[in-house]
Amino acid sequence: MADAVVVPAPQTPENRLQAVAGPVHTVVLLLFLMGITLLGYYSMNRTGTLEVPNRFQFYLPTMIWEWLAFGYIYWGVRRHGKTFADMAGPRWQNAANFFIDVALALGTWVVSLIVLGTVSHLLHATGSIQAAKSIAPHGALEGLTYLALVITAAICEETIFRGYLQRQFAAFFRNAPLGVLASAILFGAGHIYQGVRPAMVIVVFGLIFGILAEARRNIRPGILMHGWQDGLAGFLIRFLPKS
């Protein structure tokens, strides 16, 4: 007998507060993310610098752990009787859907540049720029690998933090704004190796991503914006004049 087709439920305010996986599944993911964060923090503090002497040693492990987390989330969501679309939002049905998301991504990105620039200035946070320069690719091979990393980060991090954790926290608190806030804090905490102030800036960035995902009921605009931001940062930031 053929397997039943699981149809995603409409993205209504009520089912947006429903969990997409079990609590144990979420706890295991949080422990995994905590371990990755502590490993990165220890590694950077042991060297006493944000410099990455071998960029491939950063690119490749990062891609591996992010896809592992993505696969674990996909497995848990399906095991819970949900689909990826239940968590991340429906696919593009036509060209209009695509162009609306592109416009939302670009518009939100421009706003985020202003907001993050202001917050960074107020907090005197420079670690983010230093970290971005340290992993910026040099040469064709590094450039191609970095492009793969950008695509990986855009898809996996938006799935992890906005698609999954934001939904899970919203269901736990029965409050969508608290879900946005909790996932943004974890997003910033994952970058604590850059320093406390840069991590606070990234919390604000996570809030922007989270608000966009909640307003659109979809993580696709965030994926586009995330990829655009990381791609430009990596390929252009090394050309900035040294301070």
Image (cartoon, rainbow, N blue to C red):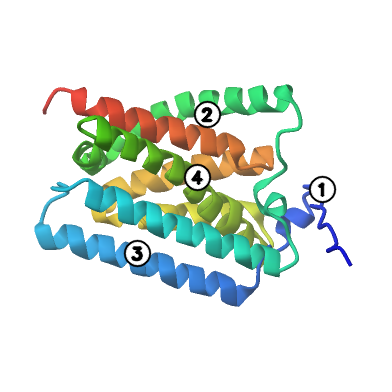
Query: Circle 2 is placed at which residue position?
Result: 108
Query: Circle 4 is placed at which residue position?
Result: 207
- Mark 4 to mark 2: distance in Å? 12 Å
Q: Are marks 3 and 2 in contact (CB under 8 Å)?
A: no
Looking at marks 1 and 2 on the same chain, the residue that comes earlier in the sequence is marked by 1
| Amino acid type, residue under disc 2 in the picture | Thr
Return the mark for residue 10: 1
Residue 158 position (above or below residue 178):
above
Which element carries disc 1, helix, strand or loop? loop
Q: Are marks 4 and 1 in contact (CB under 8 Å)?
A: no
- Mark 1 to mark 2: distance in Å? 25 Å
| Amino acid type, residue under disc 3 in the picture | Ile
| Amino acid type, residue under disc 4 in the picture | Leu
| Amino acid type, residue under disc 1 in the picture | Pro
Looking at marks 1 and 3 on the same chain, the residue that comes earlier in the sequence is marked by 1
Where residue 141 sits in the image (x, y, percent)? 26, 35
Question: Which residue shows up at 54% across the image and 23% down it?
Answer: 107
Where residue 66 sits in the image (x, y, percent)? 43, 55
Looking at marks 4 and 3 on the same chain, the residue that comes earlier in the sequence is marked by 3
Q: Are marks 4 and 2 in contact (CB under 8 Å)?
A: no
Looking at marks 4 and 2 on the same chain, the residue that comes earlier in the sequence is marked by 2
Query: Circle 3 is placed at which residue position?
Result: 36
Residue 22 position (above or below residue 11):
below
Closer mark to the observer between disc 4 and disc 1: 1
- Mark 3 to mark 2: distance in Å? 29 Å
